[in-house]
Image (spheres, rainbow, N blue to C red):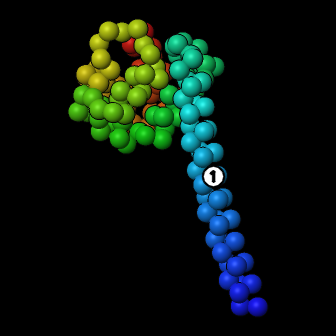
């Protein structure tokens, strides 16, 4: 009986490990799928474009880091936002955000307002 319990305990551990691995694979697959869909849309000219929604989501979820880098004039988060927005302005986004920091990240501005402002001012 003790051997059966030990074997069943091992099966539970194996099943748990397998479920964790499957969940991780699904998460990675979802991220790759979103990234590949994002790379097929060339600009953010229409609010219905998936890249616009991704840019808004990115600003909403990464706002603290984005604001810190914008104040410094650049960084990884600013570079990612620039790729999502794919604006036609030749000036790098980091220095532009640093110059326009107060207008872009002013009080009570939500992620949509930030993305709209950057898109409007840089297009």
Compared with 68, 46 (above or below) is above
Q: Position of residue 11 (x, y in %)?
A: 69, 71
Q: Position of residue 19 (x, y in %)?
A: 66, 58
For the point 37% across and 42% down, the residue is 64
What is the residue that sits farthest to the bottom in this orientation? 1
What is the residue that sits farthest to the left in this orientation? 72
For the point 52% across and 16% down, the residue is 44
Q: Position of residue 59 (x, y in %)?
A: 46, 34
Question: For mark 1, does the 10 Å Cα neighbourhood hold few (<14), some (14 to 19), or many (20 or more) residues?
Answer: few
Question: Does residue 119 appear to the left or right of 71 in the view shown?
Answer: right
| Nearest the eye: 24 or 1 | 1
Q: Is residue 11 visible?
A: yes
- Determine which quarter of the picture holds residue 28: top right
Compared with 11, 123 (above or below) is above
Compared with 20, 69 (above or below) is above
Q: Position of residue 102 (x, y in %)?
A: 31, 29
Residue receiving disc 1 = 23
Look at the numbered disc 1 and give the secondary structure of its residue: helix
| Nearest the eye: 16 or 99 | 16
For the point 56% across and 33% down, the residue is 32
| Nearest the eye: 15 or 79 | 15
Question: Does residue 44 appear to the left or right of 88 in the view shown?
Answer: right
């Amino acid at each position: 009986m003790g051997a059966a319990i030990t074997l069943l305990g091992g099966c539970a551990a194996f099943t748990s490990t397998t479920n964790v691995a499957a969940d991780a694979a699904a998460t990675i697959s979802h991220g790759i799928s979103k990234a590949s869909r994002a790379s097929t849309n060339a600009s953010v000219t229409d609010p219905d474009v998936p890249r616009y929604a991704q840019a808004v989501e990115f600003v909403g979820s990464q706002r603290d880091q984005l604001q810190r880098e914008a104040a410094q004039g650049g960084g990884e988060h600013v570079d990612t936002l620039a790729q999502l927005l794919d604006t036609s302005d030749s000036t790098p986004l980091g220095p532009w955000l640093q110059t326009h920091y107060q207008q872009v990240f002013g009080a009570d501005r939500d992620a949509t307002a930030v993305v709209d402002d950057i898109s409007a001012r840089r297009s």
